[in-house]
Image: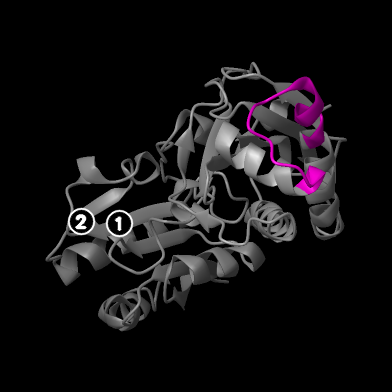
Amino acid sequence: MKQRKNILIVDNNCELEQLVKEPLLKQLENSGVAPVVIRAKDGAEAAIKSENQKFDMVLIDTEVPRLMDGGFVYGIHTYKNTQDADLIVISQKDASDLPESLRSSRFFKKPVSPAELISAMITVLNAEHHGTAAREPATAAAAHKYAVDVRVINAVIKATTHVLGQFGCPNVKMEKAGPKSPNDPFLGEVSSVVEIRSQAFQGHLCISFDKGSFLEVVSTMLMEEQTELTQDNQDAVGEINNIIFGNAKAEISSYGVQMTVPKVILGAGQSIPCSQGAAGMMIPFATSKGKFYITVVALPMAKVA
């Protein structure tokens, strides 16, 4: 009986899929592997497809749209459906210019030799089938069995932009996401943290506002112009983030994820100590008067009771 292997190809113009699909199926026809090739046209669609299906291999063309400005690439080794996938990257850039999460992949500089690419894919798939594939983690975190569900991050992003829009920040712009050391200080001055946990994940989420973005939101909330951080207006961050996480909770709970009550942390340079092997990702946002940051930190599942 053949072993099914799901392959996600992130390719906006079908060229990569057309290049490898037919030769791959033909050369593996008499093997014990049955490859199933699925294409995503950009990074956003790749994130959606990986929410619902586990992939054994991900083949990425780094020039596709909406790939480097979202969470898919930066969290690929911690999402539950791609954390164990072998990663093959094709790019016009040098490997050293890629995000850290892609640097330990099997890398091909364009123009790529179709024969070499297909040979690499077949080698990996056959080796996995016989139990001999060796994976090198792209980050220290990949050595541990845990996963960040991209749906949780998306739910928090959606709730944050919705709530801040109601509080007078309609032009919130998401900037380029990237990896973050879990022990680095928060970049904002007023932060709120919730612990989150599921069968496949434990860690925390943080929303951290800098002075400008926080005063922008709290001025609308208190219906009075706020020009400085004070004890009185800092207390409002708890209420703001209670509303944000409350908006996200129903969706997050439907994925089997539990979350605690938000904890407010005041002051710049604050951090939460994390155990060795933790991994983090940060998504910055810009408002008309400042920035705020959503950070997700994953802890090794060995710590789960």
- Front-lying residue, 15 or 3: 15
Q: Quadrant of the C terminus?
A: top right
Task: Give the residues in magenta.
Answer: 221-236
For marks 2 and 1, the one nearer the N-term is 1
- Mark 2 closeness class: few <14, some 14–19, many ≥20 residues within 10 Å: some
* Helix, strand or loop at mark 2: strand
Q: Residue at x 68, y 30 (%)?
A: 191
Per the rendering, the mark at residue 89 is: 1
Q: Bin the neighbour count of mark 1 within 10 Å (Cα to Cα): few under 14, some 14-19, many 20 and up.
A: many
Is 269 situated above or below 305? Answer: above
Counting from the top left corner in percent of width and height, residue 116 is at: 18, 63
Q: Residue furthest front?
A: 224
17 sits to left or right of 39? left
Q: x%, y% of residue 35? A: 46, 72
Instruction: State the image coordinates of residue 4 (x, y, percent, origin top left).
Output: 55, 69
Any mark on residue 294, and which? none
Name the quadrant of the N terminus.
bottom right
**Mark 2 sits on what residue?**
108
Residue type, label 1: Val
**At numbered mark 1, what does the secondary structure look like: helix, strand or loop?**
strand
Residue 40, located in which quarter of the rendered image? bottom left
Foreground pick, 91 / 236: 236
Left or right: residue 56 versus residue 53 is: left
Q: Do labels 2 and 1 touch, CB within 8 Å? A: yes
Q: Position of residue 94 (x, y in %)?
A: 17, 48
Residue type marked 2: Phe
